[in-house]
Image: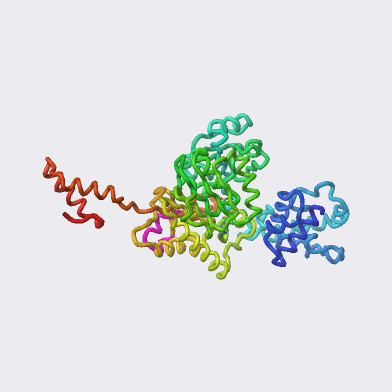
Amino acid sequence: MALYAAAANVLAGVENRQGSIKGLVYASRFQNVKQLYALVCETQRYSAVLDAVIASAGLFRAEKKLKPHLAKVLVYELLLGKGFRGGGGRWKPLLGRHQARLKAELARLKVHRGVSRNEDLLEVGSRPGPASQVPRFVRVNTLKTCTDDAIDYFKRQGFSYQGQASSLEDLRTLRGKRFLLDPLLSELLVFPAQTDLHEHPLYQAGHLILQDKASCLPAMLLAPPPGSHVIDACAAPGNKTSHLAALLKNQGKIFAFDLDAKRLASMATLLVRAGVSCCELAKEDFLAVSPSDQRYRQVQYILLDPSCSGSGMLTRQLEEPGADTPSKERLHALAGFQQRALCHALTFPSLQRLVYSTCSFCQEENEDVVRDALQQQSPGTFRIAPVLPSWPHRGLSTFPGAEHCLRASPETTLTGGFFIAVIERVEVPSPASQAEALAQELIPSPAPKRKRRQRKAVAGRSTLPCT
Ligand code: SAM
């Protein structure tokens, strides 16, 4: 199907609530997905302006057979886009007859509203918002290359390296062909917002992963050392799994689960491209994975990034501003699953550290899930670890410890919307260390002052008998 007809179909589908722009673009089977997506989003953004211009130019009175969604796409292309592509086919002569009138109506509208640029005609909500200012983050895949080599490659391609950023302001003001190293993550490069590296040879070869900074935090904060065993509970499409593998240096094991066969298939491709060799992928419901299975006896680290409303996703914010509030019913269902998954993860016997993350802004999927799951554990078994004290955006203070959680958003951290809680097992002294402490108590010490201090400290632990 031709581009303009495909775009008109997607717009009609969105209006009839058949799906999101992204979903309908993929369902259209149009080959150049990016081109179609961009055209639909832009036409949608200018929808009210286009309606006004088309109406005042009397286009439908003159062209009775022209369908409204197609007309909108064509007029967008003629007045606001790059002009008709591929010669414009039969639409060029049709619209050509009305070109002068349509242009005059657009000019009249600008005079009427006292603006000079097309962009100023947009409603405040559809002007480029903070989401469109988020820089393009690029994670260097250390399984295949190193940061210095990636930087050199970009420099040879004419990009100008500005060193490591020292503040968010450095990231905010990035323009043109400049790029930086992120102030927090040493393998994260930062490019200006509009940079598109999907066709870049280093990306195609798996040396670079196009991954938002907030989405790099879960693996970074889980920080499994090489050799350890990790569960990635809801893993597809696998960006965080490949990050975990890089931190493990491919040594150890990642057990990655997901329910969705299609997503798992693209994850398998992604992992091969990224050179990941320490991951076992399984199409399995994480809730059905048995914590007592001997295969998982050494699992000390779990990453839980479950399905969520996605209300913080950048594409969602760019595509359908304002559509980021899921219904109560959907939130309830999602939070129910998230909480079951978190409680299940906390039952793995060797678990030491778990990262729970979502790309949602909603408290119900974030702080509430963590609070309720922790309340269901025996008191003092797990706690929320205080991490990244300088991170500017914290969890909502809805319960004690919630301030240790991290939040992220385009406005506050120049990233997509995100939530992260790092949960760790509270150290319980093992029977061996209890016996050792007790023995120390019973051996007379040559330094009476020190002994007194020691006795006081040990007596403070409720698990030890007082002597
Ligand atoms: N962590 C992934 C990444 O960084 O690429 C993104 C995970 S996505 C937010 C959530 C995933 O959870 C989806 O792929 C979905 O299919 C999967 N999922 C949903 N319910 C699940 C379940 N019960 N067990 C395992 N995976 C599940």
Name which residue lies at 17% across and 50% down.
Answer: 455
- Looking at the rendering, the quadrant in which ligand 1 lies is bottom right
Foreground: 72 or 397? 397
Going by the image, does 323 lie left or right of 90?
left
Image quadrant holding the N terminus, namely bottom right
Which residues fall within the magenta stretch? Answer: 396-406
Name which residue lies at 53% across and 63% down.
Answer: 337
In the displayed structure, would residue 368 be above or below residue 134?
below
Going by the image, does 89 lie left or right of 390?
right
Foreground: 221 or 242? 242
Q: Position of residue 132 (x, y in %)?
A: 60, 51
Going by the image, does 99 lie left or right of 180?
right
In the displayed structure, would residue 154 be above or below residue 24?
above
Main SS class of the magenta portion in the image? loop
Q: Splitting the image into 4 quarters, where does residue 73 fall? A: bottom right
For this orientation, the residue located farthest to the front is 294
Foreground: 451 or 91? 451
Foreground: 437 or 417? 437
For this orientation, the residue located farthest to the bottom is 329
Q: Position of residue 37 (x, y in %)?
A: 71, 53
